[in-house]
Image (cartoon, helix red, strand yellow):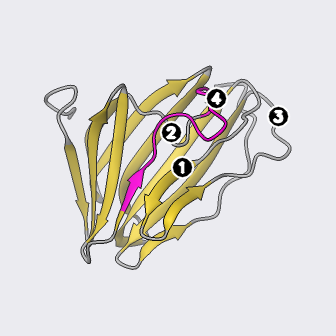
Amino acid sequence: MAASLPHAPLTLAIGPVTVAFSWAHDRWSHRVTLRDGRTWQSIEGPPADGDPRWPASPVIVELSRLQTPRGDAVLGVGLAGRSHFSVCVGPDPHDPDRALFEIACRSNEPPVWLGSTYHGPAGPTTIAPPLAGLALPATIQWGYAFSGRGLVLLPCEPPRDRSDS
């Protein structure tokens, strides 16, 4: 089921983690808050080099809430330049108290930068997938989670050539 209004805030609670999505200018932004009050705010817009084709965090312009067997999840899609992003946030299948972020970018040109950027308790934090040996077009994936203890980095899959998709 999609959010009732195109820009109505959307909140997802998973154990000690709350993810709150809000509309910021031309895309969705989100804040992750732990039960103990620590927060991570997604950083949107161009990265330090200013190239809008490669944003600091995935561009999400459409957002939907989904019901899954593990509980509520949020699916988002968007694009920047010639790259398409998809994001799924929901309960981690291995730990129901962790909010799992699974991200993919379908790219037709070599990325200058790709990843997720947050302003967290210790300052800026980046999560970036490996880009070495990228054969285009490619689907680049990365993932991470938030638990009651904070940010959990997960192994990134190598880029895949998916010329059939």
Task: Report the Cα–Cα distance between label 1 and label 2.
Answer: 6 Å
**Sequence order check, earlier mark of 2 and 3:** 2
1 vs 3, front mark:
1
Question: For mark 4, what is the residue?
Answer: 51
Q: For the residue labelled by badge 2, is the local secondary structure a helix, a strand or a loop?
A: loop
What amino acid is labelled 1 in the image?
Answer: Ser
**Sequence order check, earlier mark of 1 and 3:** 1
Query: Quick check: marks 1 and 2 in contact, CB under 8 Å?
Result: yes
Where does the image place residue 144, in percent across and percent down from the top left? Answer: 51, 61
Question: For mark 1, what is the residue?
Answer: 116
Boundaries of the magenta span: 40-54
Left or right, residue 9 beside residue 64: left
What amino acid is labelled 3 in the image?
Answer: Ala
Camera-side residue of 132 and 67 = 132
Residue at (75% x, 35% y) in the render: 161
Q: Is residue 1 above or below residue 156?
A: above
Where does the image place residue 162, in percent across and percent down from the top left? Answer: 71, 32
Where does the image place residue 57, in percent across and percent down from the top left? Answer: 51, 42
**Sequence order check, earlier mark of 1 and 4:** 4
Q: Which mark is residue 58?
A: 2
Sort mark 3 into few (<14), some (14-19) or many (20+) by Cα contacts within 10 Å: some
Sort mark 1 into few (<14), some (14-19) or many (20+) by Cα contacts within 10 Å: many
What amino acid is labelled 2 in the image?
Answer: Pro
Task: Report the Cα–Cα distance between label 1 and label 4.
Answer: 15 Å
